[in-house]
Image: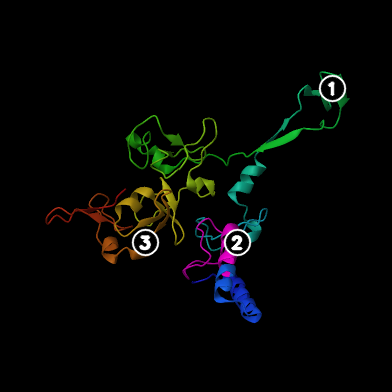
Amino acid sequence: LQLAEKDGQQLANLKEEGRLRGWESTELDTALEAEIQRLREKGCFCRRVGVNGKLSGSICCQKCAKTFHPECLCLGKKASNAAYTCADCERKSRGQSYMDLPQGWQHIVDALGRGVFLSSDTGQVSCDAPPGTRVRTTPGLLPFDQNPCMSRGELKGVCQVCFQEDTDVVDCAECGLRVHSSCYGEQVAPENGVPWLCKSCEYGVRSPECPLCPLVGGAVKPCQSGGWAHVVCATWVPEVFFEVPERMEPIGGLDRVPKDRRRIPCIVCKTRKGAIVQCGTGKCHVSWHPL
């Protein structure tokens, strides 16, 4: 494993401890697997304990201590722990709290303008919540920032993966991305009335760039090597794959894309940015970006 410096030191310490205690190889493997799983649970959503040497160190949310790779969040090299708050904590700070009162109780404002609790059965008035009260907190949403793909003329009303118009689509509450749940790898369709977030908005990443085409934003999923790529691009570029096909993430194989795919210009946009696919009919070599 190519381990991050911090995580690698923890695993090295565990291995040395096992050696001193005379653990059998199977016991050591079990302990290492448990430690790797623990690191993944507290770490970045890309689920990597190790890095490929091109990613910098992790940053830590100042409120919940979750760690992420700056490149996975599309943050610059100047990102620091002191200034970073994860998207989940931001939403919690914007959330609202509700009280589920026991039957027969209600929350009212008395003549002095104080919030008190009144029992309609006994007439009892209390400044404190009655026993059995449950407090529910619903997370808020980050400010809406329209996904660039949703302003592309005739395509803005269709699924951004299959490009078919249908009523069975979901819209991201924070960027407006429209997709079919199945096209985007969502195992369970969101419930009615419950805000749905696309994967990039879930982690507070807005309009990420795709390494396989010039298009910014759109229906993207996280990559194994950091950053984000379009579901469509990952589907059509032969060397690229989904690590978990059912979920269509994380996207891997970017390092396998041959240089020729990046050197040949697209017949549509005339640029060499990203990676092209080519016609396979006869001697036709027309090339274009999937998006």
User: In the image, residue 23 lies at what x, y percent?
Assistant: 61, 77
Relative depth, front residue between 233 and 85: 233
Q: Is residue 22 magenta?
A: no
Q: Residues within 10 Å of mark 2 (few under 14, many from 20)?
A: few
- Distance in Å between CA atoms under marks 2 and 3: 26 Å
Question: Which is more N-terminal, label 1 or label 3?
Answer: 1
Cα distance in 3D space between marks 3 and 1: 65 Å
> What's the mark number on residue 38?
2
Q: Which mark is residue 253?
A: 3
Residue 156 x %, y %? 38, 36
Number of marks present in the image shown? 3
Q: Residue at x 46, y 36 (%)?
A: 171
Mark 2 or mark 1, which has the lower sequence index? 2
In magenta stretch: residue 43? yes
Tell me which residue sits at (39%, 42%) in the image: 149
Tell me residue 232's x, y (percent).
34, 48
Find the distance from the CA under tag 2 to the CA under tag 1.
51 Å
| Mark before the other along the chain sequence, 2 or 3 | 2
**How many residues crowd around disc 1 within 10 Å: few (fewer than 14), some, or many (20 or more)?**
few
72 in relation to 148, above or below: below
Q: Is residue 1 left or right of residue 285?
A: right
Q: Are marks 2 and 1 in contact (CB under 8 Å)?
A: no
The residues colored magenta run 32-59
Q: Nearer the viewer, mark 2 or mark 3?
A: 2
